[in-house]
Structure formats: C-alpha cells, structure tokens
Amino acid sequence: MQQVDYISDFVSALSRGKYPPEKPILEHMGIVIRQWCRKHKYEITWFSLDGKIGDENALYHKIYRQLVDDIISKVVKIGSYADYKKHVVFIAEGLMREGFLCFNGLLIDGCNSAWKRVEIMLRMYTTVWLNNRGVSFGNSDNVLHHQALITLYEKISQKKLIFADSCELKSYYFRILENKSREEHRKVLKSQRFTDIIPELHDEDLLNGPDERIACVKEQIERLDGMEKQILLAYYVQEKKLAEIAGELQISAENCRVIKHRAMRRLINLFADKKNCNH
Amino acid sequence: MDFSHDEIEKRNLIEEYLLGRLSEEEETALEEHLLQCESCRDKCLQTEQVINALKSSQAADKTFQTPSAAKRHIGWLAISLRIAAVFVLVAGIAILYNKTKDHPGEIALQTNPVMVDTLNKTGDDTIKQNAPKESRYETSSQARTAEAKNENRDITARVKDEWIAAAYRPSPVFEQAIGNAVRGKALKVIAPADSAVFSNNTTVVFNWENPEDKKMALLVRKNTGKSVFKQVVLPPYALDVEDPGLYYWQLLEGDQVVHTGKFLVNQ
C-alpha cells in the first residue's frame, strides 16, 4: 500500500503546484530507464541534445520535466506505479530516438566525441563476442575490432547511413565484424588502428567527468587474484550462472558463490567509501 | 508482491535485477521498493557502477581465456586426443594379436571404421574357416580374438558416435549470425525453413523474395565452415546435398551477408 501512496502523493503534490524533491525521483528514474535500455539493447549514451553530445543526467532531467508537465496539464492520468513507469518509459523512448538521430548526424559528420562513445561500447561487446568464440581481445590491440570499426566509420561517413536506433547500428557493426572474421579476409587485414582516424580520448573526459571512485575500482579489479577475477568476469561480463562457472573451475557452487560475493562486496565498499581509495 | 529489506539482502535481488534475472512481477516490486528506500537505491547505483567498471576494465580486455573458452579449446583437443588414442589402441591390439596368432589368412585389424565394420560382419566366418585344431593354446587364442573383436566393436561404436556428434555440432560464429537479425531489409526468405530437417541424399530448395531485385550469392557451408556451394543464383535454386550433418546457408549482396539460416541432413 505504501508504494501506491508514494506515487499518489507525488501526483497530488504536483497537482497542488508543490514540487516534491527531485533527487529520489531522478535517481529512481535513472535506474528504471537504464534497466529498460539493457533489456531492449538500447545504448543510453548514444544520444545528442541540441547538437551536442548528451549528458545522461541532462536526459533524466528532461524526462522528469516532461513527466511533471504531463501530470500538471493532465495529459496523462497516473494512478499506480505501473502507470508511472509506462509513461516514464514512453517519454524516455521518444527522447532517446530523437536524440539518437541527432547522434547519428554527429557520427556522419565525424564528431570525435560521438565516435569515441561508440568505440567504448563496441569494444566491450566485441570482447564478449570474441570470448564466446574462444578468442581473447588481447590488450585492446585486436585487429579485427579496429578494422570493423574503421569500416563502420567509412560506411557511415561516406554513405551517410542513418539507423532507426542504436540496436540497428550495433547489428550493422556485428555483420561487419562477422565478415571480417572470415578466414580469407583475415589474411588481408591491415594493421591500421581506429585511433589513427579518431585521436585517443580519455573515457572519463567524455562521459560524466572523471570519477576517482571508478578509477579506484578498476585498479582494484586488476589486483584481484586469478580465481576471483575469473569468477567476476564470467558472472558479470559473460553473464554466466554460478553453477556453470563452478563446474568449469571445478569448485563447489557454494565456494564459487562465496568467492564472488566477497570480491564484489570489497569492490562495492571501495566505491562507496572514497576514504579507502589508495590512489 | 512486496519485498522486505531482509529478503532483498538474502536473495541478492538488486544484483539479480541488474543482471535481468528477475521476473516482470519481481522487477516491478523491487522498483517500487527502490522508489522509497534510499539505502537500497544507493546500493543499486553502487552495484551498477561496479558492474560497469568490471565490463569496461582492462581485465576484460587483456589476454583472458574464459573458463568456457578454455574448455572449448580443451574440448576439441580432448576429442582429437581420444580419437588418436583409439587408433593407437586398435593398432596395439592388432600388433598383439598378430604376434600371438598361429593361423594363416587372418584379417588384420584396420583403423578405417567402414573396414572395421566389414571385419565385424565377416570376422565370425573368417575365424570359423580358419578354425584351429583343438589345443589349450589355440582355445585361449580364440578367446583373445573374441575379446579383441568385442572391444573393437565398442571402439568403433565410440568413434562413430564422436564423428556423428562432430557433424552436427553447432558453430558459434554462424549461430551468432543467425541471432543478429537483419533490420531494415525487405528480404523475405521462403525456404528452407529455419532448422529444417532433410533426409540423406536429398535436394534442398532455396527460395527467397527480394523486392530490391538485386543479385544475391548463395553460400552453403558445413558446420566446420567448409564451403559446399557458392554461386550467384536466382531463386528458387535446388541443391543436392549428400552428406549428413548440420549446414549453414547465407545470402550475400556483394560482400554483405543479408541472411543466415541453417538446416540438417539426417543420416
């Protein structure tokens, strides 16, 4: 009953012209929208607002303002959490599609920041794609990934390709990657890297600004022992089940669960507590 | 459905939510809880950030062979070693048998399973024809021959099973290509149906409709990647497929794959 009251309180406060604190709603909205994007394979960072690379927080603010306007002007009737979520997702989807089209335009124009965002996410997916085929990515020097990215860049900028959404762009990239992975093509692959076209840019400079906590966590990940690292990467990157990982490592499922839980707890505590950051 | 703090902690629901492992109902219930519980919301945000850090870490990039990838490599190696061990065993039995044999005109054990099958069928007759004189030594030799024959049947069956399994083993690369849906293309594939099963020595008809009317190349490969057919053709196109196994087929526009499918041919 409490959940229904919270939404009702929020709606009735807005109707009376009183604005509840934004922070809880914005945080919650971010969680829900990112989860929705993960489920539907949308890339939340591939969008542009007003011709510039979009900031995720700015997107949530825009969604929040739209939601508030719709409730006040009674465009939508929100009586339950389900209604609230449906409308938030509806607004988010519309803004992300619009934002992606602008982002597509930036890619066609060869905008470095936009391409760097694409490179960051595609590198992550390629690592998993290669791992599933028994091939390691190898210190980010993977020729296949760079060549596929260069081809994608050339096709988008020369043919001015427009995609309906980020899913379509990713599908297109994986088709290129698959073609490149064929044996006969591999022999003629050049050693040119994508950073020969797009200069090296730091990830932290592009997204929400540098975050010491994330840098701390990444450093700690490097220091994990072999089994902890294997378990965490298999569970969170490859999204395998614990029983499967335990079987492959030939340890008990309970042992695997404990190792994973302890390692993850250490990383989360490190992130939460800036004072523990040794960097 | 409502969740208490204890239940969320005990079942590690926040992590399960972020990994997409909750049902719709559980997801909604957790999200409603997060709307009003600041500590759970903070924990969710922290866990999300750590998972993102893991995914984008250099550890994920570096030379890292995942347990299953290692197992796959080892799996193929193990199968090859097993097949090699079987051949060595069969050859060893043949040598041992030849050393102890006292009868002319016996058939030496062959490593070719077809010939081994032939041996199995004719072995009894051959042994009867060359039946030794009754003696203690000859009786024990007969027993050894029978034993070797039985063992040989087991080895043959095992080798055959492994070869059959290999012919139908899915290829991760092609399975991924099937999974990557082609968006925005007006191509309509009529035949064969996905994962259609055909009998041995059959004719497979490939048919599709392409409103853009562009020429397409048809490529048919075995699950090992070995090309069976590649040519620019017009639909419908009939292809004779002899060997049993799992096949992948693709339509290409230039060098761009526009469709990937698969079919099976029974033994």
Image (cartoon, coloured by chain):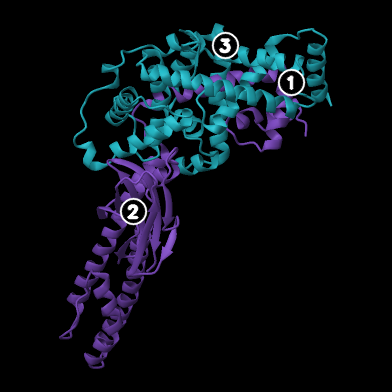
Chain colours: A cyan, B purple
Quadrant of the image for the N terminus of chain A? top right
Instruction: Tell me if residue A41 can be seen.
Output: yes
Looking at the rendered image, the quarter that the C terminus of chain A falls into is top left
Q: Position of residue A245 (x, y in %)?
A: 49, 39
Amino acid type indicated by mark 3:
Ala
How far is the residue under mark 3 from the one under mark 1?
A: 23 Å
Residue A106 as seen in the image, left or right of residue B84: right
Q: Residue at x 31, y 64 (%)?
A: B241
Residue for point 39% across, 69% down: B199
Disc 1 residue type (three-letter): Val
Q: Residue at x 17, y 75 (%)?
A: B99
Q: Chain of mark 1?
A: A
CA–CA distance between discs 1 and 2? 56 Å
Q: Is residue A73 above or below residue B69?
A: above
The location of residue B150, given as percent across then percent down, is: 34, 76
User: Which image quadrant is residue A226 in?
Assistant: top left
Q: CA distance from mark 3 to mark 2?
A: 48 Å
Foreground of the two, B123 or B27: B27
Residue A276 lies, in percent from the top left, at: 54, 9
- Residue at 23% over, 92% down: B129
Looking at the image, is mark 3 or mark 2 nearer the viewer? 3
